[in-house]
Amino acid sequence: MTDFTLNGKPVSTSPATGERLSETLRESLGARDVKIGCNAGDCGACTVLLDGTPVCACLTPTQQAEGRQVHTLTGLQDDEIAARLRESFQDFGAAQCGICTPGMMVAAVALLRKNPDPTTEQVQDTLGGVLCRCTGYRKIIEAVLAVTNPAPALDDPVGHTGAAIRRLDGQAKVEGREAFGDDIAPAGTLEILIIRSPYARAEFVLADLDGFITAHDGVETVLTAADIPGQNCFGVIPDFADQPVFAVNETRFRGEAVAAIIATPDFIRQFDPAGFPVTWEQLVDAQSIEQALDASAPQLHEGRKGNIMCGGFVKCGDPETALDNADITVQADFTTSFVEHAYIEPEAGFAQMVNGRVEIHACTQAPVMDRDALELILAMDANQIRIVPTGVGGGFGSKLDLSVQPYLALATLKTGKPVRLTYSRTESLQSTTKRHPAQITLQIGAKSDGTLSGFNFFGHFNTGAYASWGPTVANRVPVHASGPYRIADYRAETQAVHTHSPPSGAFRGFGVPQSAVAQETLFDELAEKLGMDVLEFRLINALDNGVPTVCGQVFEQGVGVKPCLEALRPAWDSERAKAAAFNAENEFLKMGVGLAAGWYGCGNTSLPNPSTIKSGIRADGTVVLHQGAMDIGQGANTVIAQIFATALGVPV
Ligand code: FES
Ligand code: FES
């Protein structure tokens, strides 16, 4: 037994040897305000106070808490410093998705108890062990500093669009009450362990699964492709859907699922997946764009010849002639890499059968798309499937795709029992979507007066083993590769290439940031060669109201890139002067200042992007709004309510 005091109350628990304090707190003692981001001491989401000192609960064996005081965020309800932090975190928007907030606030309480008036550097140092993927940290630092030096509170009584108001869902986040994907399931719920391919490409054979189930206490069942009542296929773009829930015979990326064990938490904790009855034969793979485009490369999908999934193309004017007539041209090749979304909350959820209906609680950016996909996988009507979105601890695009949902649904359907599944950080990294790596060749010309004269772009985008949002990337990039500039003579072509890598998908910009890197870099080079200031060069070419884009679209109002660039001018001048002064004084350490513009169209490229809201009026006159845009930290719950209230002329 281990006895300690949790949030002021004595507790007694029987942890396994070396059990993590985070697990004991969450699973045995119900302290779900302690979050797990990495289970490796890297993210700080699990920070608790041990005798007043912040520690990573995931690195602390529970036995070390014997006889000591443990405080989590909910145990600090009556703490005066925590109370002030709750207010300032809301006033400064320091809790966005909120998954890091409990750890961040606990660490801040410890700092402010020791040092009631810290400097910015001291706040940065102390909170440096707690990662936040949403805020950029500045808001958090300001919120902590404001505990001692309060800023005016946000008190707009109407709260219409344009007013800075507190998040409507902020209180739960700063009190540690927000429930995320792994916070729903009762302790002791059956768990799912997915068996994944150890190779980028392999043939595999599943052996005696019935024998495996019988031989292992705690194993309820095993799921494979044979358990899928409907289609073993999903994808966010219906015409390109190609990803199996479970691979059949051959895997296409390392980490792809081939089977899943449904078992008790004790079994899952102790089981080594190497003991699962599957044999693998590694096959030659093609993980890079070059390998996949080689004539001898294995083909990933029938009907996608040469591993080209699809392409995109935009042309206007006569780019070849314009480049020939340019006074100066620049050209370069650019390569960008995979980027992981790295939200602090890994994919997680819980499912159960309720009155014959499968009910899935999961962190998701797209509950309606989840339900549509599950209709096909489960061969069930939409009204037999209920998706209940939990809090989402960061998404950034990747939680638009299915992850845990089909495994949860299949497991609860097969067993009739509640089940839960939370990806480890390794599983999340291996199996969920990434930003597309790109290989771009770009040539741009300009006249001596700085006006652009010809633009020729070609990009390969590594879309991985399955389509996901690859078609959107392939189509969106040619539309956007011009940046927010007027280019009369333009050509942009893309190809999305399948490789034996994790699927690439949506990630803040659908390929546009990759093309912007190339275009903005060459704009700097052109300006430099023309002897022009890079800001002036951009202003000469920036789009404006009434000026056509490369697709011929003419915005009659609201084109803001020129005013944005103009607004930057004072900072641009002062920062460059600062850098020049610094560089004059320092021989080895140098400072640089950069400037870039970007644009990004709203909506699903080349796809409808429908939405529906429901609203009504209660007997007491209050207005009710139901809307389905998930708040993943970006503030949709608040902003959409503001828009709605503004349209109706009522206060939020
Ligand atoms: S540091 Fe403990 S969960 Fe990340
Ligand atoms: S608010 Fe910090 S990770 Fe989302």
Image (cartoon, rainbow, N blue to C red):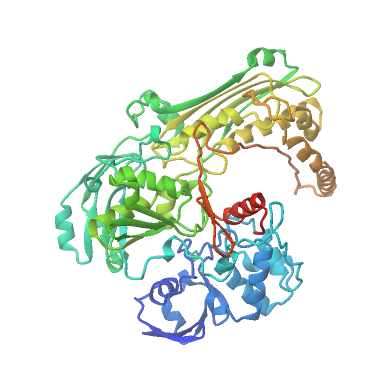
Total residue callouts: 0
Q: Nearer the viewer, residue 217 or 18?
A: 217
Q: Percent from the top left, x then y, of residue 559?
A: 72, 35
As displayed, is residue 39 above or below residue 597? below
Corner quadrant of residue 141:
bottom right
Q: Nearer the viewer, residue 121 or 596?
A: 596
Which quadrant would the N terminus be assigned to in this image? bottom left
Residue in view at x 72 percent, y 68 percent:
145
Task: For residue 256, say whether it is visible.
Answer: no
Q: Nearer the viewer, residue 63 or 78?
A: 78
Corner quadrant of residue 565:
top right
As displayed, is residue 396 above or below residue 186? above
Q: Going by the image, does 125 lie left or right of 218?
A: right
Which quadrant would the C terminus be assigned to in this image? bottom right
Residue in view at x 53 percent, y 34 percent:
605
Task: For residue 41, say whether it is visible.
Answer: yes
Q: Percent from the top left, x then y, of residue 87?
A: 66, 70
For ligand 2, give the image quadrant.
bottom right
Q: Going by the image, does 489 lie left or right of 504?
A: right
Q: Percent from the top left, x then y, of residue 594?
A: 73, 41
Task: Determine the residue located farthest toward the front in the rendered image.
Answer: 619
Q: Percent from the top left, x then y, of residue 355?
A: 29, 60
